């Protein structure tokens, strides 16, 4: 029975800290001969589909209620085991499946699938498990269904061929339909000659047999429409995925004799509609930019008997297809939220071929986690070359000690112990059985995993210890029925993210313990509504290597964030925070309600602003209209507003309107704020000082090195910007651009603007430039406007030929008034060379070059930046202006000075 069928007995149970699929009552032992054949097949399908869904979704448990009518379980049913071997395409079931009886339930433990499932196996494996691919090809005179491994190789090959035939140049005109040639002229191909015939004799022997390109079928006289409808998808998929061919319905395959079908039994118009509908319903998946459908021709050839019309022969000619054709969607499942869903052909192909590797990232970034080694739902993780790898981050943040149990972070443990005197003894009592490992504390592991907080939770403590599975302890202030639900949901999310985000490929579960600190229930273990599932011993961590591998996955979970590059590259990419960024984000927001974050150019201030707003939503249960993001320029406002995590406004709008509903304010690029519309800082402080008796959050991100004016900023004096944190690790820019930024900052140090606090220069000795990414810095002087425009157009032409696209490029001028002038000149010049669009920074989502002022592009970034005739009204802020310009470029920077 299909798992999407509402009548199915299979359900996803929600009260366990793991994915648990209940497949209902059935006999699980080999002694099942008394079961009706249809029931046995249904039970086999249910268990196989549940196993497929869990393999593809991070692993979990199949829960079977044992049918006592057939006695106690003996040897596990062979049909179950056969289906599992088909799924993993290996006899090594123990690697992915273990079983255990618990009371009246039989549990099947399923580990997540990965592309490198078996030690020493270097052969390419599919990224998904499937019961049936429904992807066919011709194999001699037969139709062959592709296994998952064969389908994986076929799709990879098709994708590569598509790129070679029709490389996609985004921003250019769409390519024409790919044409795949095959030889089918009547002179060289007798099948083509017969296809073009208007009539054939009954009993005539065709002058060719079945082959790679020809298939004969006889009409089924019972239900002709259904027979044709059921026959077409399989053979069309096979011919289209191979080299094309002919399907003749009405020919005996053994004798090549024309039989046709009696005219009284054939409604040719009705059958034409059946054929047309069958082709229309075929799932096809493209790798190229064409949206072509399967090309075919069909006709009914008269069959003549004794000089009269006897009936018809149905002939279908199928052209080879550019990409992939399925007969129907693959039989492959995943758990999606609370449902177990069958994948569409498009989803299946996208996951099978995967987005990894990505050339643009591989040049400037280091792969921390490749999808070619991870579980099916895993996304690639990159960090800038030169930054700590996940192994280094793990050893720095979560080291595995020798012969003892470490509490981390120690500062939070000290705070919690002083706030709750009974907590220390309670935790130590729980930790007494464990001699080696690490206890990772958090005021809310739920918030750390982007889930809502629970106000009754004092803290959560994740135990990663030797000879134990991971255990999440939740400590409540008072007994609460929702405490177990909170802990279970948090543990389930953590387990899923360790696999599907962190890339952990071992057997893993996260057990739960909920404890109460109130005097009447102190230390009492609160039980959930269902007894916990007892996992096999193989789910315990046995040594340092196991613990470190799991902790490295945890690093990706906690420090991973969705990069802004993901929008540009069209696929999900995770980056890792630096230790410095993570420590700031890990602050207790209830204690750090006001904070000034001083971040040098390229240290990731805007990324931090976005992530702190996401944390605010979960920690304080805020709707988006309760969090306000304020910046100076409209493009940055629109960019952040598009993420749907807050209300985003410019400083001018902030000063004009009343914000009664706002509880928390995040201010970005504050060095460029002014007081021309009033004291914005005082207004922000007043809004967040008291809301319903509780102060809100006010975090301000700024960098005086990028100040773009000489007016009063409205910020408090530097010595009153307290408490404050500093971001001094420059992570965004390539080496040459970073060195240029360093020179500019040294120039500013020697001659700072009048509104630049000299105390801010104390950050310079602490700055850390992360090397390792080669880039481009070209400075050209004494150029006329025409020479500048020509140089920009020629350089873009060269870059696009190398594979860059318009969305990589920003052209920045000094003032907004210059935008129109340069837009007309550059557009005219570039139209002679390439097909691109140029837009202002108000629209950064499309595949267009951005042309705007440096000030309006502040806070945004692109791989390639042209600084066109940079100038300022006052020379004392020119170096600051250039620092802002340079920090917008990730890889290549071109500064073009005027005559």
Image (cartoon, rainbow, N blue to C red):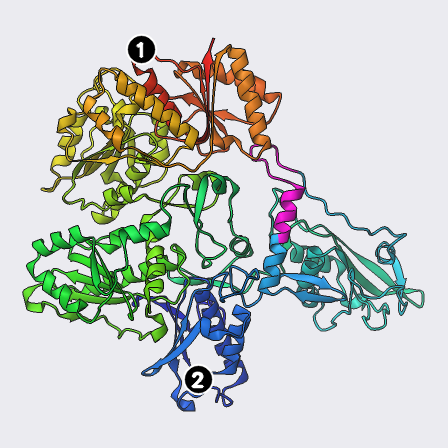
Quarter of the view holding residue 510: bottom left
Q: Taking 526 as reference, is 800 above or below it? A: above
Task: Please indicate, yes or no, whether residue 394 appears anywhere in the rendered image.
Answer: yes
Left or right of 252 in this view: 294:
left
Q: Going 62% across and 36% down the picture, which residue do you hit?
A: 174
Circle on res. 27: 2
SS at badge 2: loop
Q: Going 62% across and 23% down the picture, which residue do you hit?
A: 833
Viewer-closest of 102 and 790: 790
Circle on res. 284: none
Quarter of the view holding residue 507: bottom left
Which residue is under mark 1? 874
How would you rate the neighbour count of disc 1 (Cα within 10 Å): few for under 14, some for 14-19, many for 20 or more? few
Q: Taking 511 as reference, is 246 above or below it? A: above
**In the image, which residues are magenta?**
157-175
Q: Position of residue 196 (x, y in %)?
A: 85, 54
Q: CA distance from mark 2 to mark 1?
A: 84 Å
SS at badge 1: loop
């Amino acid at each position: 029975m299909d798992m999407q069928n509402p009548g199915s007995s299979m359900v996803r149970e929600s009260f366990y800290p793991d994915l648990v699929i209940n497949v209902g009552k059935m006999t699980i032992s080999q002694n099942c001969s008394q079961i009706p054949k249809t029931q046995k097949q249904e039970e086999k399908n249910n268990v196989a589909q549940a196993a497929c869904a869990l393999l593809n979704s991070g692993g979990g448990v199949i829960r079977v209620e044992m049918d006592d009518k057939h006695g106690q379980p003996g040897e596990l049913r062979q049909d179950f085991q056969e289906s599992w071997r088909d799924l993993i395409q290996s006899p090594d079931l123990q690697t992915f499946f273990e079983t255990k009886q618990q009371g009246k339930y039989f549990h099947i433990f399923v580990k997540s699938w990965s592309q490198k499932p078996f030690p020493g196996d270097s052969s390419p494996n599919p990224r998904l498990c499937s019961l049936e691919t429904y992807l066919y090809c011709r194999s001699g005179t037969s139709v062959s269904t592709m296994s998952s491994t064969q389908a994986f190789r076929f799709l990879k090959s098709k994708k590569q061929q598509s790129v070679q035939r029709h490389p996609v140049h985004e921003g250019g005109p769409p390519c024409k339909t790919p044409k795949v040639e095959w030889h089918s002229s009547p002179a060289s191909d007798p099948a083509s000659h017969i296809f073009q015939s208007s009539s054939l004799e009954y009993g005539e022997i065709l002058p060719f047999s079945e082959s790679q390109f020809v298939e004969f079928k006889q009409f089924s006289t019972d239900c002709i429409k259904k027979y044709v409808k059921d026959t077409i998808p399989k053979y069309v998929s096979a011919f289209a995925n191979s080299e094309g061919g002919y399907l003749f319905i009405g020919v005996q395959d053994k004798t090549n004799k024309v039989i046709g079908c009696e005219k009284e039994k054939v409604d040719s118009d009705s059958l034409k509609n059946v054929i047309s509908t069958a082709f229309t319903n075929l799932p096809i998946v493209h790798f190229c930019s064409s949206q072509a459908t399967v090309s075919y021709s069909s006709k009914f050839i008269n069959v003549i008997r004794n000089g009269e019309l006897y009936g018809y022969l149905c002939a279908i000619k199928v052209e080879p297809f550019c990409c992939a054709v399925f007969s129907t969607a693959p039989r492959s499942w995943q758990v999606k939220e609370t449902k177990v869903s069958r994948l569409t052909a498009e989803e299946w192909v996208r996951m099978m071929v995967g987005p990894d590797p990505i050339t643009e990232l591989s040049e400037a970034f280091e792969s921390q986690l490749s999808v070619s080694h991870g579980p099916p739902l895993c996304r690639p993780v990159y960090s800038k070359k030169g930054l700590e790898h996940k192994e280094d981050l793990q050893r720095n943040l979560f080291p595995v000690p020798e012969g003892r149990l470490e509490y981390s972070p120690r500062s939070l443990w000290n705070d919690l112990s002083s706030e709750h005197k009974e907590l220390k003894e309670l935790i130590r009592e729980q930790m007494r059985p464990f001699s080696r490992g690490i206890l990772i504390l958090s005021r809310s592991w739920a918030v750390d995993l982007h889930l809502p907080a629970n106000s009754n939770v004092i803290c959560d403590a994740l135990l990663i210890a030797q000879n134990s599975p991971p255990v999440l302890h939740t400590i409540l202030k008072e007994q609460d029925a929702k405490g177990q639900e909170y802990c279970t949901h948090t543990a389930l999310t953590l387990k899923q993210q360790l696999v599907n985000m962190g890339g952990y490929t071992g057997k893993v579960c996260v057990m739960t313990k909920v404890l109460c600190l109130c005097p009447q229930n102190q230390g009492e273990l609160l039980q959930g509504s269902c007894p916990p599932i007892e996992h096999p011993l193989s789910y315990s961590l046995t040594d340092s290597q196991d613990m470190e591998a799991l902790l490295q996955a945890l690093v990706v979970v906690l420090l991973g964030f969705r990069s802004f590059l993901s929008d540009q590259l069209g696929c999900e990419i995770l980056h890792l925070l630096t230790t410095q960024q993570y420590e700031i984000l890990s602050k207790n927001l209830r204690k750090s309600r006001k904070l000034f974050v001083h971040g040098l150019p390229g240290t990731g201030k805007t990324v931090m602003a976005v992530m702190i707003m996401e944390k605010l939503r979960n920690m304080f249960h805020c709707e988006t209209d309760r969090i306000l993001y304020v910046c100076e320029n409209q493009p940055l406002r629109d960019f952040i507003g598009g993420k749907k995590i807050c209300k985003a406004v410019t400083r001018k709008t902030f000063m004009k309107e009343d914000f009664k509903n706002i509880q928390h304010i995040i201010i970005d690029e504050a060095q460029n704020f002014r007081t021309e519309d009033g004291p914005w800082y005082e207004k922000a402080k007043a809004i967040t000082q008291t809301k319903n008796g509780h102060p809100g959050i006010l975090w301000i991100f700024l960098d005086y090195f990028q100040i773009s004016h000489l007016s009063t900023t409205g910020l408090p004096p530097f010595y009153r910007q307290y408490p404050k944190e500093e971001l001094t690790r420059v992570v965004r820019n390539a080496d040459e651009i970073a060195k240029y930024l360093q020179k500019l900052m040294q120039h500013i140090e020697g001659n700072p603007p009048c509104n630049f606090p000299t105390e801010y220069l104390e950050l310079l000795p602490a700055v850390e430039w992360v090397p390792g990414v080669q880039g481009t810095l070209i400075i050209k002087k004494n150029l006329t406007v025409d020479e500048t425009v020509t140089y920009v157009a020629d350089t873009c032409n060269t870059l696009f030929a190398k594979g860059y696209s318009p969305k990589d490029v920003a052209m920045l001028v000094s003032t907004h008034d210059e935008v129109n002038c340069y837009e007309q000149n550059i557009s005219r010049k570039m139209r002679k060379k390439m097909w691109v669009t140029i837009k202002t920074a108000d629209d950064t989502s499309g595949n267009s070059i951005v042309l705007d002022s440096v000030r309006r592009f502040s806070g945004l970034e692109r791989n390639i930046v042209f600084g066109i005739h940079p100038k300022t009204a006052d020379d004392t802020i020119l170096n600051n202006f250039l620092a802002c310009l340079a920090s917008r470029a990730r890889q290549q920077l071109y500064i073009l000075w005027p005559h």
